[in-house]
Amino acid sequence: MESFFELKTPAEVFEIIGRFGPVGEETVSLENAMGRVLSRDLVSPEDLPDFLRSTMDGYAVKAKNTFGASEGLPSLFEVAGEVLMGEAPGIVVKEGQAVKIPTGAMLPKGADGVVMKEYCELVDRETLEVSRTIFPLENVIQPGDDFGRGDPLLNRGHRLRPQDLGVMAGLGLVQVPVFQRPRIAVISTGDEIVPVDRRPLPGQVRDMNRYTLGALCHRKGAEALCMGVCPDNFEALREISLKALDQADSLWISGGSSVGTRDLTLKVFDTLPEFELLVHGISISPGKPTIIGRCGAKPVIGLPGHVASALVVAEVFMTRLISRLSGGAGSGGGIQGGVEARLSRNIESANGREDYVRVKLAQEESILTATPVFGKSGLISTLVESDGLIRIDMNTEGLYEGEMVEVMLFDPVWGGLS
Amino acid sequence: MESFFELKTPAEVFEIIGRFGPVGEETVSLENAMGRVLSRDLVSPEDLPDFLRSTMDGYAVKAKNTFGASEGLPSLFEVAGEVLMGEAPGIVVKEGQAVKIPTGAMLPKGADGVVMKEYCELVDRETLEVSRTIFPLENVIQPGDDFGRGDPLLNRGHRLRPQDLGVMAGLGLVQVPVFQRPRIAVISTGDEIVPVDRRPLPGQVRDMNRYTLGALCHRKGAEALCMGVCPDNFEALREISLKALDQADSLWISGGSSVGTRDLTLKVFDTLPEFELLVHGISISPGKPTIIGRCGAKPVIGLPGHVASALVVAEVFMTRLISRLSGGAGSGGGIQGGVEARLSRNIESANGREDYVRVKLAQEESILTATPVFGKSGLISTLVESDGLIRIDMNTEGLYEGEMVEVMLFDPVWGGLS
């Protein structure tokens, strides 16, 4: 695996990832729709609200009856009753009449506006002084002000947030069409790897990639099917890969770190049905030996064996793949929440290669500083000590101390809001 | 509810929220620990790795035997065998001997470094030319390089990320001590509110807060216990509140929008066991009428009835409360991932009040612009159309078109990465 056919740039890889599409649709209940991606455009089935609603505590009137009313010259109204919350008022407001109304209640027929109670004073139980002119439809929400019947509501591909569930609840949309969560089969290969519940013998290590990659899938809304540990053996890897393809929407193999393992992954991929190689090496560090191919519509991925490299590749590329398989836009145009920080020291970087550097954040008075976490690439401690990644462009030779950099956070909230 | 005893500033409210603590501890399996908050400091139970490990494909040697070796003057070694992945090598490397070794394998006894295979050439099956000098411990990871036995690993209060699960897997820590997810009882009050599966009669609306607040709890790692809709009735609200306190770690009541509902919430709170009022009104918009109190260690919250106001208060304050109850740091020092954007128009704001303004993002060439989404405060469409919030400080009178602002995203990833 010394030579790569042709290293792809990250931009090319994003474009290739963007060609994959959602794995399927299903319907979930509103309670379970948080964070899911809509599989269809939603249209409002009715007006929201569907009645003329007061936005203030006050009195419902015919607006024109208040014309000219002011503090110096209030208008007099006859109090014709009161509207209660949640009821269709039986009263009809006639010329010169006012009906008491709370915020959120339905306006009685004949009224077209609400005078805030601050501008109203009861002279006696049946007589009201209004000291302000209101315009028609003042202090009311009209039917359809939120969404009118037939209005576009939310689009296919939109990831549902609390407010989106709120509006669906308001409209009675309790069955939600969403894309299925992609099922990702994760296989760790390597003769030295043992399952986590076994005590490693000298020369052996416990399987970490299963947990790092599985957790990343989970965090991004995919379901991880952990297929276990596989030795560096062609037949065994082929067998488990076929089984995985049968059960899952995508297959990820993280190579052990032995010589030829990555060759082995590609050899196995080559024998899978309809396999097509799309990426054989990416011009990034870490993560250069990444393989991306497809079996029909299913992406098959060969990730580096080093746990830290595999996780960086997963953070940068596989999160986008999961987004695509989940019905999201995936690559291109995505803006990830991050933080700006001042670099605490110079970082060198090779031209022609995009570097993802682990950094640790610290709050120094009013400014956030990012300090690179260096260390041998095989060490997971470098990632555990880091808060996020900074990207160094292919066309630069590094970054300087004091530069402001954008940090992609491993966790969307860094620091106190853990 | 016209007058508030004393409006608290957001900073004061954050401080008050910071006084609440985690609700309890439990043990979860490593598979289920993603996103959970550690309840204890973890210490490494063993060395990781626990053997001297090669980081390169090459030959294990005594480093001193390579001293002086160069391209022009290579040193000769006797090839004494090969180490296989995952095995404890039986060979002992003697003076002048080299043993073939793959990346990740255990060094044989006697060797203290690895020469990369790029600097090695087999003259015949038993003779190796080495064209580079290596230092002792070059191209190896020593026992404990990642974490040594007894080293601090991860601290209490840390929210677990994929890499953290990875290192726990590597150390065989499969049972993880975490704080319990807080259970939040959510009650919607209002005579006009009907459950979502009922067709509202004229004057009635479906319960939205249950879904918006429930989804926000879910997104922040809490469990929402939806207690259903309660009419604006003292006895009914008191009864359901007592039941909620019995089952949950915190009680949130979002008032209906009828007159006196917020009075009602406080009246009911006042009768709950050990109730203490902490906040009665916050100097923010929207969300001023928020109530925060406690019954013993359990926070009891009165949220605005307007779905949009309730959700903004929940985004700004309740996420921190959930963090505290989950064992996180909660208020103070938290830095939320966001994006910088250019404001597309002026926004006025009252002095002495912190405003949270809904904005919609758009990518215009290389710059992100934020446009305020205005609209009647009772409309949820304003939140559905928005991508996030910007905060306008108490001591300013607004923001100007063209200013760069920090947008708190409703969703940590905006745009293509949905």
Image (cartoon, coloured by chain):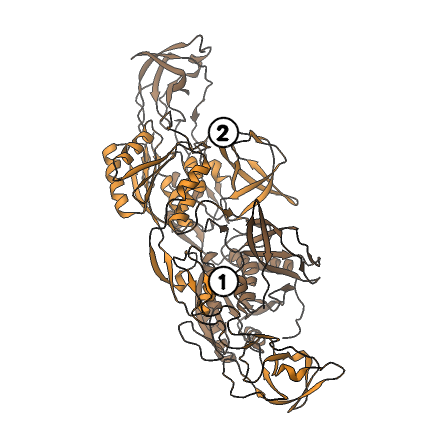
Chain colours: A orange, B brown
- Residue B241 position within the rendered picture, expressed as x and y whole percent measured from the top left: 49, 72
State the quadrant of the N terminus of chain A: top left
Tell me which residue sits at (42%, 30%) in the image.
B143
- Residue B309 position within the rendered picture, expressed as x and y whole percent measured from the top left: 56, 66
Residue A221 seen in the current view: yes
Nearer to me, B293 or B193:
B193
Amino acid, disc 1: Gln
Q: Chain of mark 1?
A: A
B22 horizontally vs A291: left or right: right
B33 horizontally vs B364: left or right: left
- Where residue B392 sits, quadrant-wise, is bottom right
Which SS class for mark 1?
helix
A277 horizontally vs B20: left or right: left
Q: Residue furthest top?
A: B73
In three-dimensional space, the C-alpha distance between marks 2 and 1, rounded to whole angstroms, equals 44 Å
Relative to B373, is A279 above or below? above
Relative to B255, is B115 above or below? above
B25 horizontally vs A68: left or right: left
Asked whether disc 2 touches disc 1, contact meaning CB atoms under 8 Å apart, the reply is no
- Where residue A9 sits, quadrant-wise, is top left
Residue under circle 2? A352
Q: Chain of mark 2?
A: A
Q: Which of disc 1 and disc 2 is earlier in sequence?
A: 1
Relative to A95, is B185 above or below? above
Count the labels in the image. 2
Of circles 2 and 1, the one toward us is 2
Q: Residue furthest right?
A: A72
Nearer to me, B297 or B337:
B337
Residue under circle 1? A163
Which label is found at residue A317? none
Which SS class for mark 2?
loop
- Residue B397 position within the rendered picture, expressed as x and y whole percent measured from the top left: 71, 59
